[in-house]
Image (cartoon, rainbow, N blue to C red):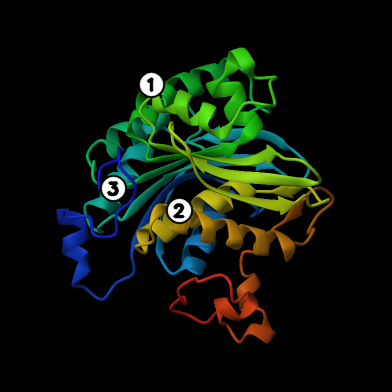
Amino acid sequence: MTRSSAPDPSRDNDTADASADSDTLPCVLSFNANDPTGAGGLSSDAMVIASIGAHALPVVTGTYVRDTREIIGHAGLGDDAVAEQAGAVAEDIPLHTIKVGFAGSAEAVAAIAAFVSDYPSVPVIAYMPDLSWWSEHDIDHYLDAFRELLLPQTTVLAGNNTTLRHWLLPESATDRRARATDLARAAGEMGVSYVLVTGMPTAGDQLSNVLASAQAELFSQSYERIDAGFLGAGDILSAALAALIATGSELTEAVAEALQYLDQALDHGFRPGMGRAVADRLFWAESDSGGDPAAADPSIDIPHPVNETKH
């Protein structure tokens, strides 16, 4: 597939064909920072991708300095080191999807964009986290680089409604009535095919998550508000989506299953520290499910991981 079209499991490219006949899992290359709380970042990406039934290729962009209450800072890795990690593994292992989480700097965004341009047939799932903890100068440079270099190569842009509104629709950032299609239209002007917007307000005590193109809403799912504040939900959703597309799911089907996975992970969440809660991404491996992901919730059609991991 190309990034201007919906993910197609029958895509015809040399990378996919080279791995089709081999006994291997589909591989998801993830650019992200380390999160020492384990709630998000690379360790979360790897756990989610494995839960779906794919193999993670984690490329570290730096590390957060944080606890479960707040982000204290971030130590970035040089852009050359980011590019060298990705280049080395991609020359060896076929890529099925690429996920971009927090790159850490505008320079790292540029390096990732240059790498992605060498794999035009591989879908890119880009997640934009909340950057409000960062300095205004760093945020502006990061978003400018992301907008100019990476968005034109992005298949699906995922993010919270508030974060995406402030970035894509700054003139109406306070307008909570902005629709997912408005965000998709703004993203489409920069080359993005689809947006996956979380936390859209609805009537009642629910939030809606919407997949949209510039023309229409393609899928939506509403969930009850969860009282607890969670860390890492956006990383979980975008990693699950990338993994499901890698395993061959059609886009709307992948979004539906990724949202169900996230909902179950949050429902089984726990609070390891004094701050926000952490989702249980291995909820399906609890002893009463026998290591069967479907047994935890039969409505979630997740391929069985190779190893039947238990807590």
Q: Secondary structure at mark 3?
A: loop
The residue carrying mark 3 is: 122
Disc 2 from disc 3: Cα separation: 18 Å
Q: Secondary structure at mark 1?
A: helix
Q: Which disc is residue 252 wearing?
A: 2
- The answer to which of marks 2 and 1 sits earlier in the sequence is 1
Within 10 Å of disc 1 (Cα), the crowding (few <14, some 14-19, many 20+) is: some
Q: CA distance from mark 2 to mark 1?
A: 27 Å
| Residue behind mark 1 | 148
Q: Position of residue 79 (x, y in %)?
A: 38, 32
Q: Nearer the viewer, residue 66 or 30?
A: 30
Mark 1 or mark 3, earlier in chain: 3
Decide if residue 37 is in sight here.
Answer: yes
Mark 2 crowd level (few <14, some 14–19, many ≥20, 10 Å Cα):
some
Between the residue at mark 1 and the residue at mark 3, the CA separation in whole angstroms equals 19 Å
* Percent x, y of residue 130: 63, 33
Seen from the viewer's position, the closer of residues 266 and 35 is 266
Quick one: label 2 or label 3, which is nearer the N terminus?
Answer: 3
The quadrant of the rendering that contains the C terminus is bottom right
| Marks 1,3: beta carbons within 8 A | no
